[in-house]
Image (cartoon, rainbow, N blue to C red):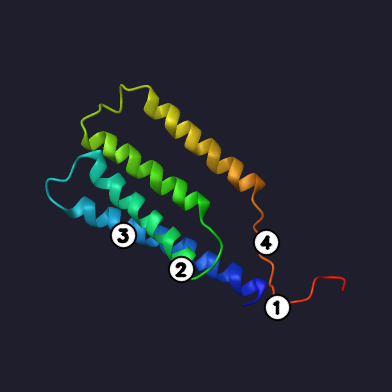
Amino acid sequence: MTDAEHRALDERLDVLSWGIALIVLAIILYLPGVHALWHYLVPFGIVFIGMSIVRVLIKTRRDTEGLILGLAAIFIGLLDIFGLDLRFFPLIPTILVLVGILLMINALVSKRVRKDPGRPPEGA
């Protein structure tokens, strides 16, 4: 697979992840009696962790951002399941800020260009 094909696949998987997440959230919104925060966060997190697993299985780039987002959503959802009042617990906003910073750092330092092992290096 060429560099361009890898990039195209990565972009399709990114769009697919967000599309699935939005459909899952919409379905949950239609369910009667579903109002707790965890009803939204846990499935949202599962979608992104699942897509990270798919990326490993098809051997494309790792989706660190999706994995971080998925784990954070599930973590906050689990805190909500256990009855922690998230609005008044100061650690939750701190965790969200830290996750956001980790995502930004990852975006700044990660190398997004995939090298095609079958192609000779440039300039050779």
Do the CB atoms of the residues marked 2 and 3 lie less than 8 Å apart?
A: no
Q: CA distance from mark 1 to mark 2?
A: 20 Å
> If the image is split into quadrants, where does the N terminus sit?
bottom right
Is there CB contact under 8 Å for labels 1 and 2? no
Is 111 positioned to the left or the right of 50 in the image? Answer: right
Calculate the distance from the C-alpha at mark 4 to the C-alpha at mark 1: 15 Å
Residue 113 — which label? 4
- Packing grade of label 4 (10 A; few <14, some 14-19, many >=20) is few
Picture layout, residue 45 above or below residue 78: below
Q: Which residue is mark 3?
A: 23
> Along the polypeptide, which appears first: circle 3 or circle 4?
3
Element class at badge 2 = helix
| Image x and y of residue 55, in percent | 48, 64
Q: Determine the secondary structure under disc 3.
A: helix
Q: Sequence-wise, which precedes: disc 2 or disc 3?
A: 3
Q: Residue 117 lies in what quarter of the image?
A: bottom right
For the residues marked 1 and 3, what is the alpha-carbon distance in whole angstroms? 38 Å
Mark 4 vs mark 1: in front: 1
Residue at which label 2 appears: 57
- The residue that disc 1 covers is 118
Query: Going 39% across and 61% down the picture, which residue do you hit?
Result: 19
Using the numbered discs, state the Cα–Cα distance from disc 3 to disc 4 in whole angstroms: 30 Å
